């Protein structure tokens, strides 16, 4: 824990002093008082959260990322060491990255010769003439870290985006895991085809000719229960919005087959 945490103050985002050497001078100020500068054993930034969560955040510029993947292998070593202490591991790629016309992993940089921004392949350090990684190589390496090793990989095109994502992540962890129910909240859209969203009447109606998902809700409003729906006459089905005589006839005929 940082000295501030030990003194009972509000927990903060701890930033390693070495990380500050290659970002802007006022980087820590962008955290609005949440930052505490110290020397970390693992990662570039760490913080404590609820449920004893102790996330570790590593930030890599594109060239450092390529180096740590192919040249030194440092990225995997860093992760495995940090995983012994930290509950979660996040890897942030800092910079605007993409693929150049030849399929190489590239960053969006200013070309002084052409006097314009363009995708420039990220060279593998220590290679002369320079060699490059294909975009798919880097992407699949990160996919493996994400899906096999459980590393959460995020991108941030500049420092402001990085800080915003770190602060959001910090506050997310200040709540217990069980308190995060936003994706289950009714105020967010849920597909109408999800079974838990549909009454038995709707599930029956959606299987009928020309009714489907779109008109099943309207049918639910007309029929009080499933039995009434099954026994419904053509005239009653025509009360359903969007159902005419021909559709009503097909519906009743289909129900009679049951």
Image (tube, helix red, strand yellow):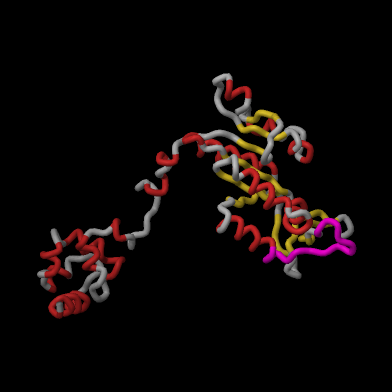
Helix, strand or loop: magenta stretch:
loop
Labels in figure, total: 0
Q: Which image quadrant: the N terminus?
A: top right
Where 258 falls versus 99 (above or below)?
A: below
The verdict on residue 131 being magenta is yes
Where 37 falls versus 221 (above or below)?
A: above
Residue 199 location in percent, x, y? Answer: 23, 59
- Choose between 18 and 251: the one closer to the eye: 18
Task: Tell me where residue 66 sits by quadrant.
Answer: bottom right
Residue occupying the far top of the picture: 7
Question: Is residue 184 visible in the rendered structure shown here?
Answer: yes
Residue 124 location in percent, x, y? Answer: 80, 59
- Choose between 50 and 95: the one closer to the eye: 50
Task: Tell me where residue 243 sits by quadrant.
Answer: bottom left
**Residue at image location 15% in from the left, 80% down from the top:** 257
Where 247 falls versus 192 (above or below)?
A: below
Q: Which image quadrant: the C terminus?
A: bottom left
**Residue at image location 58% in from the left, 54% down from the top:** 149
Span colored in magenta: 124-137
- Choose between 28 and 64: the one closer to the eye: 64
């Amino acid at each position: 824990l940082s000295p501030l945490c030990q003194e009972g103050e509000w927990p903060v985002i701890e930033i390693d002093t070495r990380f500050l050497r290659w970002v802007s001078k006022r980087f820590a100020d962008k955290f609005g008082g949440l930052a505490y500068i110290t020397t970390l054993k693992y990662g570039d930034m760490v913080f404590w959260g609820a449920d004893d969560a102790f996330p570790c955040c590593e930030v890599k510029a594109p060239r450092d990322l390529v180096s740590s993947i192919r040249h030194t292998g440092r990225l995997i070593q860093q992760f495995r060491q940090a995983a012994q202490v930290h509950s979660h591991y996040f890897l942030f790629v800092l910079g605007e990255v993409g693929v150049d016309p030849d399929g190489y992993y590239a960053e969006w940089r200013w070309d002084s010769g052409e006097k314009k921004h363009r995708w420039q392949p990220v060279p593998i350090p220590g290679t002369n003439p320079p060699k490059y990684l294909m975009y798919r190589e880097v992407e699949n390496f990160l996919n493996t870290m994400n899906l096999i090793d459980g590393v959460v990989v995020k991108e941030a095109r500049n420092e402001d985006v990085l800080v915003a994502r770190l602060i959001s992540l910090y506050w997310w962890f200040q709540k217990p895991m069980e308190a995060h129910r936003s994706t289950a909240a009714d105020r967010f859209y849920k597909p109408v085809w999800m079974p838990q969203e549909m009454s038995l009447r709707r599930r029956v109606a959606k299987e009928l000719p020309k009714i489907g998902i779109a008109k099943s809700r309207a049918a639910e409003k007309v029929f009080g229960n499933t039995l009434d729906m099954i026994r419904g006459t053509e005239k009653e089905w025509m009360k359903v919005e969007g159902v005419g005589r021909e559709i009503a006839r097909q519906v009743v005929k289909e129900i009679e087959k049951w």
